[in-house]
Amino acid sequence: MQNLIFTNDVEGAIERLIASGDHNITAWIADTNTARLMPAPPHLITIPDGDSNKTLETVCRVWDEMERFGVTRHSLIVNLGGGMVCDLGGFAAATFKRGVRFINVPTTLLGAVDAAVGGKTGLNYNGLKNEIGAFAPASDIIISTRFFDTLPLPEMKSGFAEVLKHAMLSDRAEFLHLLDHDFSAPINHDDLLERLQHSVQVKVNIVARDPNEQGERKALNLGHTVGHAFESLAMKRGKPVPHGYAVAWGLVTEAVLSHLLLKFPSDDVHRLGNFTRDNYRDFPFTCDDYHELLDLMRHDKKSRDGEITCTLLTAIGDYHIDQTVTPDDVAAALDILRDHL
Ligand SMILES: NC(=O)c1ccc[n+]([C@@H]2O[C@H](COP(=O)([O-])OP(=O)(O)OC[C@H]3O[C@@H](n4cnc5c(N)ncnc54)[C@H](O)[C@@H]3O)[C@@H](O)[C@H]2O)c1
C-alpha cells in the first residue's frame, strides 16, 4: 500500500518521513530543472532532463553516485521530478542492493496524477519506450501543486488530460467540473489540490484491485490505444506532440467509439470534443494518415492478435476493458474527431 500525502508543505512532509525511519542517508534524485525547485540537499544526484535520458546509461550513473554516497538498504531515496525522474529513480532505487526505500515527490501534473503513483518504474531501451522496468511502488508519495507555477503550459495541459481520463472512469460531476477549467487563469492551488486528490484516488483504487495489470488496470488505458498511435506517428515523423495532447485526442476518439458501439451519450462526446478543440489544438493528421495510425493501433502493446482493443465507456464512470473495434469504426471516429478540432 502506498502512503499518499497531499500537501503544499512539502519540506515538512519530507522531514517527517525522514524522521519516521532509521535511515543512514537520504539521497535525492532530480533532473537539471527539478534540482532547482528545492534548496539543494547534501546528497543530490542530478541527471539530465528529458525522456531521451531515461536510459540505462543514466541509471548506471545514478548507481555510481549511490555507491559514492554510501547508500545502503537502510537509506532513503527521494525522487524529485516529473514522470521521468520518478520512473528512472524508482527503477534505480528498486534495483540497487536489491531494493532501497524510495519516495516520490512529483513536480509535474502528469507525475502527480499518473507516473508517481501505482508502482510502475522503467526506462527506455533500444528505442522502445518503457521497455525495461519493474513493478516497484514508492513507499510514500507527496502530492503537491506548489511546483506547478513554473511548469510550462503544454506540460500542464498534458497532465490535465490524465486528470480528465480519471474523471471519465469515475465521476460525471468531476468530469463536468474539469471541463470548466481555464488554463489562462492563475492556478487555484486549493481547488487543484482537491482535483488531484480525487484523480489520484481513481488510479489508486483501480491499481489496488489489479496491481500487475492482469485485467481491470487496463481501464487506465482509456484514450491511450488511439493516443499512443498519434504519439508514435508524430514521433516517427520527427514532429513529436506532448503525450497528454495525444491522450486528449485519443479520449475524444474513444468517446466517439464508445458512442458508436456502446451508446455513450453524445452530449458528453460533444462537451469533451469542445474542450479539446479549445485547449489541445494543432491536430497534425488527415485522412491520409489513417492507414498508418490503424497499423500502430494493431501493434499497440496492449492489443492482441492484431486486433485493435480499447477501453470503452457506456457512460462516464462505467468502463469496459478489452473492447475490440474494427478499422472502419476507428476511421469513422477519427473523422468525427477531425470535425471537432
Ligand atoms: N510509471 C508510470 O505509471 C507512468 C505513467 C505515465 C507516464 N510515465 C512516464 O512519465 C514520463 C513523462 O513525465 P512528465 O510529463 O512529468 O515529463 P518529465 O519528467 O520529462 O518532465 C517534463 C519537463 O518538465 C521539467 N519539469 C519538471 N517539473 C517542473 C517544474 N515544476 N517546473 C518546471 N519544469 C519542470 C522537466 O525537467 C522536464 O524537462 C515519461 O517518461 C513517461 O513514460 C510513467
Image (tube, grey):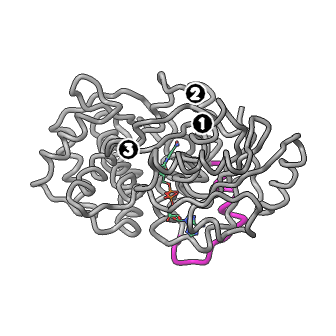
The answer to whether the residue bearing label 2 lies less than 8 angstroms from the nearest atom of ligand 1 is no
Alpha carbon separation for disc pair 2 and 1: 8 Å
Circle 2 or circle 1, nearest the eye? 1
Q: Amino acid at mark 2?
A: Pro
Alpha carbon separation for disc pair 1 and 3: 17 Å
Alpha carbon separation for disc pair 2 and 3: 20 Å
Relative depth, front residue between 242 and 16: 16
The answer to whether the residue bearing label 3 lies less than 8 angstroms from the nearest atom of ligand 1 is yes
Name the element at disc 3. Answer: strand
Position of 193 compared to 155: left or right?
right
Relative depth, front residue between 221 and 13: 13
**Image point 49% across, 34% down: which residue?**
318
Disc sitting over residue 119 in the figure = 1
Residue 69, visible in the rendered structure: yes
Q: Amino acid at mark 1?
A: Gly
Residue 197, visible in the rendered structure: no
Crowd class of label 3 (few under 14; some 14 to 19; many from 20; radius 10 Å): some
Residues under numbered marks 2 and 1 in contact, where contact means CB atoms less than 8 Å apart = yes
The residue indicated by pointer 3 is 129
Residue 210 versus residue 157 in the image, above or below:
above
